[in-house]
Every structure is written in structure tokens, then in C-alpha cells.
Image: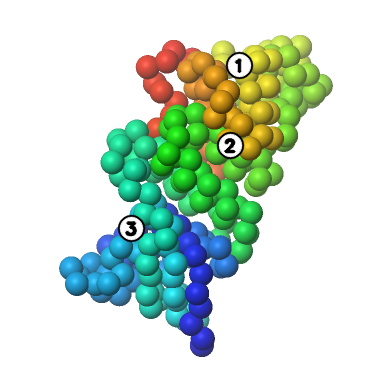
């Protein structure tokens, strides 16, 4: 079988035997794949730089019947800034985790790939907390798990929405709130802005920590509902902020 070349983001790596690693890579051309990287843990391996988690890499792969094997890989962008800041490291860990969990598998999706790369780039160079929430919102929207405008699931009201731990939304008229957490009109507008605007535009928008945390919690609830289990949270919400659950 012919070797294949593609770009990819290293989402995670797992040590395998003494010198090898199994990489989870979100690639531009094959979707999310597992790659056997032989000998990559040897100090002399020329592929070490091209197998670091959070890196955007250019890879050459051998495609076997049931697996990909790494021929060679070099870093296109290592996003070193992410490794140099604890906050950025947490946020990037959450971003790659969410991508890993929500991307189904071997199916190329160029627009999702470019969103994933853009998320890492903004996390490396911009304000971390807001960036993570913005990209999680964009990801959920792109996967069809979030409408362009969030509204009451029964009457489409967009004034003040209480959300459940499954990320379902109801206005006060339609259901007795089972949770005290709600998104008010301003927060709903902010979420809509996150989905519809370019990241460059959003950088200039001031959002309070409280609003950001509530939007993050809402998105995490939605993600958990789709996963069918609790999402492990690294970066947000900031637990020092009073969120009722
Ligand atoms: Zn309603």
C-alpha cells in the first residue's frame, strides 16, 4: 500500500513498549486516527519533534489494513507558548480532550480541522479562558450540537434560560427550573456572538468572568450529554466563581 502524507494535530500520545508510542492524531485527510510511532522514544529518533502533543505536524504514514504507522514526521508549529504557561497548558489539554472525545473517527473534515488548528493558535497567543470557551462553542455548533441561537426548547423564548445538567434549556414559563443556573439575555447574545463572529472580532469583546463561566458550564453540560458521561475539565469554569449546581 502507498505511503500517505498529511498534516495533523497530535491530540495525545501513549507509551507502548520500551521505545514506541501510539499517537492519537486529528489529521486533515483521514480524520482522527491512531498511529504507531516505532522507536520514537529513543533519544536519537528524528521524529521526536514531530510527535509532541499539541503540535501541528507534517506526517508521512504507512497505511496498513487496521492501522497507520509513522514513517516520518516534523513539526510545522510546535506552539511552544502553550508548554510555557500553566493556564495555556490546561486550556490546550481541555481543547485536545474535547476534540478527541467529540470527533468520531476516520472521516476527513477540513473545516473541523481548520477550527482545531485555529483553536490551538489562539490559545497559544491570546487570552486563554475566553478563547477556550469561544472555540468550544464553535465546535459544538459545527458538530450540530448547538443552534446558532440558543432558545427555550419548548417556546423559543430567548429572555432568560435555565439550563439542566444535560445542557437542555427552558424559560421560566415552560418548566419549573430544576437548576439555579441560567443564561440571561446578555449571556445568550454573547454565546451567539461566539458562534457567529470571527475569533479576531471576539478578542475585542469584554465578557465578565461570571458570564464566561456560566457559558462554559452550559457548554460542558452539553458536551457531557453527548458523550453520555462527565467531561473531565482542566481549564474552565473557574471554580472560585460561585456557580450553583
Ligand atoms: Zn419556554
Label 1 or label 3, whichever lies nearer to me, is 3
The residue that appears at 48% across and 40% down in the rendered structure is: 122
Q: Which mark is residue 7?
A: none
Spatial CA span between label 2 and label 1: 25 Å
Report whether 164 appears left or right of 11: right
Image quadrant in which you'd find residue 73:
bottom left
Mark 2 surroundings: few (<14), some (14-19) or many (≥20) residues within 10 A: some
Residue underneath mark 3 = 52
Under circle 3, the secondary element is loop
Mark 3 surroundings: few (<14), some (14-19) or many (≥20) residues within 10 A: some
Spatial CA span between label 2 and label 3: 26 Å
Residue underneath mark 2 = 199
Image coordinates for residue 240, horizontal then vertical, percent? 37, 17
Label 2 or label 3, whichever lies nearer to me, is 2
The residue that appears at 27% across and 62% down in the rendered structure is: 15
Tell me if I can see residue 116 in this picture: yes
Residue underneath mark 1 = 182
Spatial CA span between label 1 and label 3: 39 Å
**Above or below: residue 63 compared with residue 125:** below
Amino acid at each position: 500500500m502507498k505511503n500517505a502524507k498529511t498534516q495533523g494535530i497530535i491530540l495525545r500520545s501513549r507509551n507502548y513498549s520500551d521505545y514506541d508510542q501510539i499517537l492519537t492524531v486529528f489529521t486533515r485527510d483521514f480524520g482522527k486516527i491512531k498511529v504507531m510511532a516505532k522507536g520514537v522514544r529513543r533519544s536519537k529518533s528524528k521524529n521526536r519533534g514531530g510527535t509532541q502533543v499539541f503540535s501541528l505536524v507534517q506526517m508521512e504514514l504507512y497505511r496498513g489494513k487496521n492501522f497507520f504507522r509513522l514513517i516520518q514526521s516534523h513539526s510545522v508549529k510546535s506552539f511552544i507558548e502553550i508548554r510555557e504557561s500553566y493556564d495555556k497548558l490546561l486550556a490546550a489539554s481541555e481543547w485536545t480532550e474535547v476534540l478527541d472525545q467529540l470527533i468520531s473517527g476516520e472521516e476527513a473534515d477540513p473545516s473541523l480541522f481548520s477550527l482545531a488548528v485555529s483553536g490551538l493558535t489562539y490559545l497559544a497567543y491570546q487570552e486563554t479562558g475566553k478563547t477556550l470557551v469561544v472555540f468550544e462553542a464553535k465546535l459544538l455548533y459545527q458538530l450540530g450540537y448547538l443552534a446558532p441561537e440558543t432558545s427555550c426548547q419548548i417556546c423559543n423564548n430567548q429572555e432568560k434560560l435555565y439550563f439542566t445538567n444535560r445542557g437542555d434549556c427552558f424559560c421560566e414559563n415552560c418548566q419549573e427550573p430544576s437548576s439555579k443556573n441560567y443564561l440571561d439575555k446578555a449571556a445568550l447574545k454573547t454565546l451567539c456572538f461566539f458562534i457567529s463572529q470571527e475569533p479576531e472580532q471576539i478578542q475585542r469583546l469584554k465578557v465578565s468572568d461570571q458570564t464566561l463561566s456560566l457559558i462554559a458550564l452550559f457548554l460542558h453540560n452539553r458536551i457531557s450529554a453527548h458523550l453520555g458521561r462527565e467531561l473531565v475539565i482542566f481549564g474552565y469554569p473557574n471554580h472560585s466563581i460561585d456557580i450553583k449546581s
